Amino acid sequence: MKKFLVAMALTVAIAAPAAASAATVTNRDDEAHTLIVSEGGEQVELSIGPGESIEICPTGCFVTMPNGDREVLTGTERLEIEASRGKIF
């Protein structure tokens, strides 16, 4: 029983950080922008207001930026929008 509990604790410890990661998007512009996020066969438009930060794509996705550029995110990046262009860190 003790081995089972140790194995379960290790499984949870390993899985928890992976589930908690997501890409962070910050809009540095003075106007709202819309991103098109394609994830798991679904496509969603997300609006992000000026100065706002949101988390997206915990399992990876494709993102179409306000200027039409398209990027692949794995769920761990920091994306900043400035002058309608996305920059990944």
Image (tube, rainbow, N blue to C red):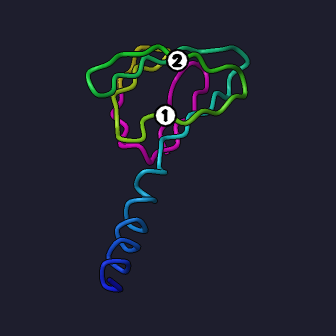
- The residue pinned by badge 1 equals 56
Residue type of the residue flagged with mark 1: Ile
Residue at screen point 60% across, 33% down: 54
Give the residues in magenta.
Answer: 71-89
Does residue 82 show up magenta in the picture?
yes
Q: Are marks 1 and 2 in contact (CB under 8 Å)?
A: yes
| Position of residue 41 measured from the top left corner of the image (x, y, whole percent) | 26, 21
Q: In which quadrant will I find the N terminus?
A: bottom left
Q: Residue furthest bottom?
A: 2
Residue at screen point 42% across, 41% down: 58
- The residue pinned by badge 2 equals 46
Residue at screen point 40% across, 55% down: 18
Callout 2 secondary element? strand
Label 1 or label 2, whichever comes before in sequence order: 2
In the image shown, does 82 or 6 lie closer to the viewer? 6
Residue type of the residue flagged with mark 2: Leu
| Position of residue 36 measured from the top left corner of the image (x, y, whole percent) | 43, 17
In the image shown, does 29 or 58 lie closer to the viewer? 58
| Position of residue 81 measured from the top left corner of the image (x, y, whole percent) | 58, 28
